[in-house]
Amino acid sequence: MSTTSTDAAPTPPPAPASAAPRRWRGPEVTLPVGRQIWAWVILTVIAAISAFALPALVAGGIMIGLGILILVRRTLFSWPGALGLLIGVILVIPVRQYALPIPLPFALEAYRAVLAVLLLALVLAFILDRTRTWQPIAFGWPIGIFFASLVISIPANGDALVDQGLASTAVSSLVNYLILFSVFFIVRQIVTTERMVNGVLVGLVWGGVVIALFAIVERATRSNFFVRLHEFLPLQVLAEEPEAFRAGGYRSFASSQHPIALSVMFCLMVALAIYLAKFGLWPRNEINRRVVYGLATVVLLGGVLSAVSRTAVVVMAVMILVTLIFRPWLGVTLISLSLPALFIGLVALPRVFETMLLSFLDVDGLIASQQTSPGWRGAGRLADLGPAMEEFARFPFFGTGVGSRIVVGDEQNAFILDNQVLGTLLETGVVGLLGLIALMVVPVILLLRWAFTVARNDPPYAMLAFTLAVAGAGYCASFFFFDAFGFYQTLFIWFIMLALGAWLLTSSAPAIAAKRARAAVPAKALVG
């Protein structure tokens, strides 16, 4: 049709310049004079109190922190900045190692304080910002099933819990689970754009690279930087510096609670680094990007080696197996690329490789190592299996109640099992085990299905969903080899990744297109 037709509607006049939308540039920096005066007064008071009433080291830490806060206020007081702060605290400050020096009836750890502030900020945002809406969480029913299994175990064991004085412990345990899971919900409500998703991925990987470098140094020097944070930050020490040895050397803890948890966290980040090597936004040149993230992967694997954990080998094996099953060519390619690195590592670190890899070939020796010290703290996993099954036979359906097994402290009444599946089975029975399967396995299945159906024509989205599913499968495997819910850092990292998966399934471009297509089907039927 000709655009010069006399029947065409007249072209509307251009909008005035004043009607053009303004680009958002963040909050205004300049404050009214009155507020500037109050700001200077408050800062002066804080400086005076810090200088005269606090130790010099603490005062210096406060002033440095305040200065940094002022410099980065525009970034920090934003949702991406708040999310970066949360990730930074999770990665850097070891859980159960430090608390904030605030006089409270309980030890206020940094991650709890950040979660409380973010939760309050989100509540206020939902109340005051009419444009903010609840972001769908995609995995609500698996999480609901898991929590229902925990709640049911309390009344089912009510009399026993009360008789043993564990009723309050059971409720506290349930509240603690809510705090842990708040990471997933908070991150999901903050992450609303693809740019934020990419930022979280990049932050996790490069944060992990930094921690891996410190872990490698720690393996060589037996000096852990992360247990010395109190020397220049206002933090209260809660526990002594941990240490462990294996393969003729020191096992790295870095910022984690245990070498096993550290190695599992690095395995999850390896999957993300491989994804970014192909679909990351920087470097823009694909060859350079693959080189950069290839080096990042090598450093992360070095962190895995520094922890000297066989659990990491199992996690990586499961991740590779899932990749071979669903994307064989990618799996073969990754195995081919890893062979030279394995050979170099075998030559450079023979005892580490013998402990982590070759020990799996000695089946009799491996089984014997897991049957040591039966009935004692630190017993092998197989040594704990028989007594655990006897206890399970007495309470098969609802266990002994969530929080009833206390494995540390003066009130200890059970041994550490190094097996989250077995621990859940004893505490909450078969019902709780079904809840755990729903929580861990169902999201992996949903992500895999989405990757090969809804997002099959959008490689970046499909591969991200597949990457998260592969990482989730590896993390599920680790549940048989350590008490995953007791090691918060790795659990938090998985919850953050799960929140990204929830964004993919509900708010990404393929998800939105699929919703529109489903909505269009009834409309076409009505027209027909």
Image: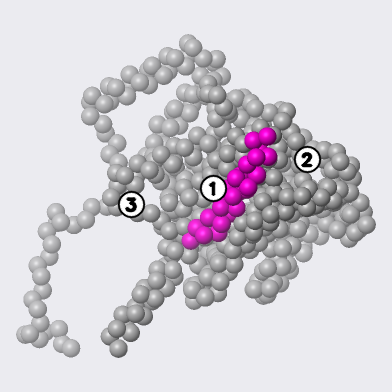
The answer to whether residue 298 is visible is no
Name the residue carrying label 2. Answer: 415
Q: Position of residue 377 (x, y in %)?
A: 82, 38
Q: Residue furthest front?
A: 159
Going by the numbered disc 3, the residue's amino acid type is Arg
Going by the numbered disc 2, the residue's amino acid type is Phe
Which disc, if any, is residue 132?
3
Task: Name the residue at 84% across, 43% down.
Answer: 379
Task: Name the residue at 54% across, 16% down.
Answer: 56
Mark 2 and mark 1 in contact (Cβ < 8 Å)? no
Comparing 320 with 409, the one in front is 409
Q: Within the image, what quadrant is residue 433 found in? A: bottom right
Comparing 70 with 187, the one in front is 187
Q: Position of residue 138 (x, y in %)?
A: 48, 61
Comparing 118 with 344, the one in front is 118
Q: Which residues are magenta?
A: 138-163
10 Å crowding of disc 1: few (<14), some (14-19), many (20+)? some
Labels 2, 3: front one: 2
Q: Quote the CA–CA distance across marks 1 and 3.
A: 22 Å
